[in-house]
Image (cartoon, rainbow, N blue to C red):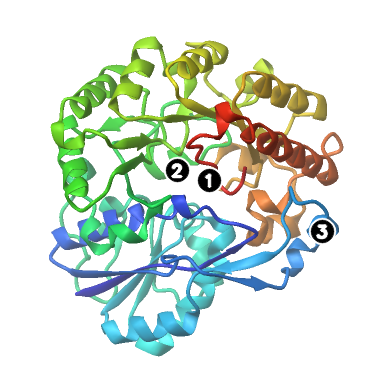
Amino acid sequence: MRILLLQPPLEDFYTTPIRLYPLGLLYTAAVLRRAGHEVTLVDALTPLKKRTLALPAGLRHLRPFLGATPHFFSHYYRFGREDEALLTEIAAARPDAVGISSQFTAYYKNVDDLVPRIKRAVGCPVFIGGHHATAFGAECLKRTPSLDAVCIGPAETGIRHLTLGREGPLLAEAVDWRTLTPAHDLVEPERYLIGRIPYASLQCTRGCPHGCDFCGVEKMFGRRLRCRSVDHVLWEMQLLHARGVRIFNFEDDNLTLRRSWFKALLLAIRATPRLAGIELTAMNGLCYPTLDAEILELMQTAGFQRLNLSFVTGDPGLRQAYNRPHVGEGLDTVITRAQRLGLQVTVYIILGLPGQNEREIKTSIDYLLDLGVLVGPSIFYIPPGTPVYDRLDLPAATRADWNLYRSTAFAVESALLPRAKLIELFIYVRQENLRRLRLPSLRKNVLVPDGL
């Protein structure tokens, strides 16, 4: 079959261009190719364009705050190409089927809009896959009647259950993802840049045994950690390097958990002449207790220039309540060691986790700021496919409105943390980050996501 894969447009107050590499679709393409299908990819988000939209009805509670300060959002945007242009390109490819990435619940609106229009324009089956599709597969089929199928879980397992009108499934035999190389040739490296440098994302491990209650990794990849061979990762990195890529972003959910494997990877990268001078990042965030002195030094010499660390909260009781691991190296120690190595550090915390209060959040923020790091404020949002999702006390209308399942909606509030207070804390973090970015010690080569 001729199968076209699509990364659709999205709508939000901001997006982070350095996080838009379509790795999930490239893995899907690799799986389909192994089964003998012909695959093309259309990325509606690259090159990135934006257009101002009217504020959706469900987000009107934010209107009093928009534009009130330069440290908060001003406008709501559509990011990506217009549907008419996409439909023309899709029809010209004459696909036998179209697969659409549906990773984030809050962005399903654009998928829902496109599916019936693709069906009318092309007349072929349309299926979706990704984290949102996995969490809400049955509901997607109800909300979008013209949708033909949903790929549940990773492509190498979910596609085995799709037929799309054929006598047999699209994928007849099981595929071990650890032997797959994503179809990086389907994208142009010069369209995915950090600064002016081509980057690519890759994944070395899947699964996370920790089972934090607010995390949906288990739903997609399970709790058992599985690692690709170091040799296979190196082969992929050298393939990308030959295409001009010089920044490699690891999209793993727990890259550093298996210390012996991660150490072997760093040593191998450092010992590969072709990879000299590259930069390594892990934008999904690293679990700081796994970063001892030896690992940090190896990371720096292999190509890491900055660390993104996941802290969540400074309250030990809340960390325990949500099954967040905190055994190992202390955060202060990790940050001090990293800074001595010249690594720039961003630490992410959650604002609005059920059970938090203003004092605890402010204390955590100031503690991190005093350590000389940038603070990443992650507003707690409705997390489908997680243990905490079923425990949330939400109005039925809020639970049904997928547009509210985003951090920028500030949809989860409580008597302890009303929306106005959450926004105030968010603005405080951004103000302090920008003030510190004016300091020479923090300004050089800082990579700051739009949300900071």
Q: Earlier in the sequence, mark 3 or mark 1?
A: 3
Secondary element at tag 1 = loop
The residue indicated by pointer 3 is 61
Res 385 label: 1
Instruction: Tell me whether circle 2 and circle 1 mark residues in contact (CB < 8 Å).
Output: yes
Secondary element at tag 2 = helix
The kind of residue tagged 1 is Gly
Instruction: Tell me whether circle 3 and circle 1 mark residues in contact (CB < 8 Å).
Output: no
- Give the x, y percent position of residue 432: 71, 34
**Dot 1, crowdedness within 10 Å: few (<14), some or many (≥20)?**
many
> Image point 51% across, 69% down: which residue?
49
Res 219 label: 2
Query: Relative to residue 231, is residue 408 depicted above or below?
Result: below
Name the residue nearer the viewer: 218 or 313.
Answer: 313
- Give the x, y percent position of residue 101: 41, 62
Secondary element at tag 3 = helix
Asked whether the viewer can see residue 372, the reply is yes
- Give the x, y percent position of residue 314: 66, 20
Res 255 label: none
Give the quadrant of the C terminus.
top right
